Image (cartoon, rainbow, N blue to C red):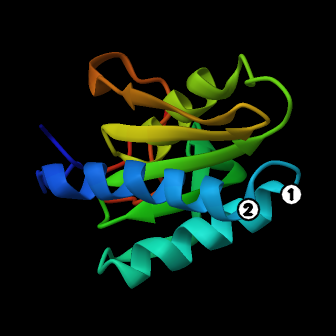
Amino acid sequence: MRGNDLGKPVRPEVLSIQIASAYTVQREFGFGFLESVYRRALAVELRFLGIAIREEVPYELFHRVVSVGMYRADLVAESTVMVETKTGRGQDPGARGQLLNCLSAAGLSLGLVVHFGPRGVSIQRVVASHATDRVRRSNPNTSLHL
């Protein structure tokens, strides 16, 4: 599976460790905290397990070569998998679409929406196909400015 535009593959164990880590965080904290608590706890758990993780990774968005805004990904693991943490009584119906756009902006192909809710953790795997992307990342050497 393609991990990013440089062709770095997603190691299968990285995805498995991320999923297991989300369940560990859910068991530890239960439901009722802010998203930032779950994001930080997930980052701590992943680092503890040896996964390289970056938090609040910024991506600049362009339209016609003009910067139109910034997006910050909650977590990026091993430079290949974007993780968006959510919390609330119900799942956010727009979370998958938002993550698809963010994957496009980052030039990544794989992401997880991790929702910490009252009935436990739920995880959606999101795979992006960059063939029809409308938003590109900000690296001027690889960006397409529409």
Identify which residue is drawn at 57% across, 41% down.
Answer: 114
Give the labeled residue for mark 1: 33
**Is residue 109 placed above or below 80 in the rendered structure?**
above
Give the labeled residue for mark 2: 29
Spot occupied by residue 7 in the image (x, y as percentages of width and height): 11, 51
**Is residue 92 placed above or below 30 in the rendered structure?**
above
**Circle 2 Cα neighbour tier, 10 Å, few/some/many (<14 / 14–19 / ≥20):** some
Gap in Å between the C-alphas at discs 1 and 2?
8 Å
Q: Are marks 1 and 2 in contact (CB under 8 Å)?
A: yes
Identify which residue is drawn at 40% across, 30% down.
Answer: 125
The three-letter code of the residue at mark 1 reads: Phe
**Residue 120 seen by the camera:** yes
Spot occupied by residue 52 in the image (x, y as percentages of width and height): 34, 77
Q: Is residue 131 left or right of residue 34?
A: left
Quadrant for residue 93, please give it: top right
Spot occupied by residue 8 in the image (x, y as percentages of width and height): 13, 57
Quadrant for residue 77, please give it: bottom left
Which quadrant would the N terminus be assigned to in this image? top left
Identify which residue is drawn at 56% across, 46% down.
Answer: 65
**Circle 1 Cα neighbour tier, 10 Å, few/some/many (<14 / 14–19 / ≥20):** few
Task: Tell which residue pokes out farthest to the front in this image.
Answer: 27
**Is residue 46 placed above or below 75 in the rendered structure?**
below
SS for tag 1?
A: loop
The three-letter code of the residue at mark 2 reads: Phe
